[in-house]
Amino acid sequence: MFACPHCNEKSISLLDKSFMGAFKWTSHECAKCGNKVGFSTFKYCLAMLPFVVSIFLINFKSFLPFPYRFILFIFGITVWLMLVLFWVPLVKK
């Protein structure tokens, strides 16, 4: 569970945070206080860099055989999700 930045209560689950976004329309309501919570936009965009780089390498480095491209894609998604869940802070929206 993650603490709400408004009320400091641990009311945001890992599943809620994994479906949350950095923009106002993708924010989540706290179960305790009802205020909107989202991600820091700058850190969210930084966390997306491994995924973007993996997509770039998959599309423009065609010398990689398919299994390696698939592994690179899965690695990019995994790093992105881990950074979003454990590095990007929750902020008030």
Image: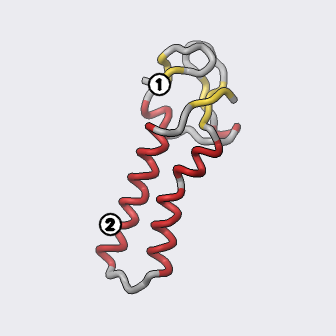
Most foreground residue, 71 or 89: 89
Question: Helix or strand or loop: what does disc 1 sit on?
Answer: strand
Residue 42 lies in what quarter of the image? top right
Q: Residue at label 2?
A: 71
The number of numbered badges drawn on the structure is 2
Residue 2: give x, y in percent of width and height: 47, 24
Residue 71 falls in image quadrant: bottom left
Q: Identify the residue shown where x is 49% and y is 32%.
A: 16
Query: Neighbour class for label 2 at 10 Å: few (<14), some, many (≥20)?
Result: few
- The residue identified by callout 1 is 2
Asked which colour scheme the image uses, the reply is secondary structure
- Point out residue 9 in the picture as x, y percentages from the top left corner: 52, 14
- Regarding mark 2 in the picture, which secondary structure is present there? helix
Q: Quadrant of residue 83?
A: top left
Q: Position of residue 14 (x, y in %)?
A: 43, 32
The image shows residue 45, relative to residue 52, as above or below, that is: above
Residue at position x 55%, y 15% in the image: 8
10 w.r.t. 61: above or below: above
Nearer to the camera, 76 or 16: 76
Contact? badges 2 and 1 (CB < 8 Å): no
Q: Which corner quadrant holds the N terminus?
A: top left
- Single out the residue that lies furthest toward the left: 67
Which corner quadrant holds the C terminus?
top right
Determine the CA span between mark 2 and mark 1.
Answer: 30 Å
Task: Check disc 1 and give the amino acid type.
Answer: Phe
Q: Position of residue 17 (x, y in %)?
A: 50, 34
Residue type marked 2? Ile
Q: Which residue is at 31% across, 73% downward?
A: 68
Comes first in the chain, label 2 or label 1: 1
